[in-house]
Image: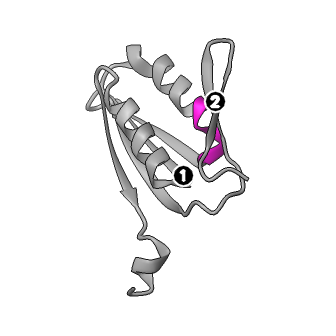
Amino acid sequence: MSKSPSASAAEGFTFWKKEESSVETRVAVLAIIVRDTASVPALNELLHQYAPYIIGRMGVPYHARGVNIISVAVDAPADAISALSGKIGRLSMILTKPLCTLTQSKQQGK
């Protein structure tokens, strides 16, 4: 068993594989605000690459403000959550913030 997610390339894309391991995962929600739909294909490609970690997603168009609001629930190692959030944040006209649960040891007060 691997200790971290492994990446594979297919048709020029990297896909993360969720593997059984001893790596601690966290439940998180990524809040994403899309201000320009031109970046949506790149956003969807990133979400597709991290699909094994995604529990679900919900998108809401907010026409009055001209934005789209997306929430993505994930169960992933902290480094995968950080990497995905960082990659999304580098897309033009897209803002993102992750909200993560505590690790098991912090939840138990250790």
The disc placed on residue 74 is 1
Q: Amino acid at mark 1?
A: Val
Residue 32 location (% of width, % of height): 37, 39
Image point 61% across, 44% down: which residue?
Answer: 5
Which residue is under mark 2?
A: 15
Image point 50% across, 61% down: which residue?
Answer: 26
Residue 90 location (% of width, % of height): 31, 26
Q: Amino acid at mark 2?
A: Phe
For label 2, count other residues whose C-alpha is less than 10 Å away and answer few (under 14), some (14-19) or many (20+). Answer: many
- From which residue to which does the magenta span run? 48-53
Residue 104 location (% of width, % of height): 49, 76
Q: Main secondary structure of the magenta part?
A: helix
Q: Is residue 1 left or right of residue 88?
A: right
Residue closest to the eye, 65 or 106: 106
What element does badge 2 sit on? strand
In the image, residue 59 above or below residue 110: above
For label 1, count other residues whose C-alpha is less than 10 Å away and answer few (under 14), some (14-19) or many (20+). Answer: many
Can residue 62 be seen at all in this image of the molecule? no
Residue 97 location (% of width, % of height): 32, 46
The residue mark sitting in front, 1 or 2, is 2
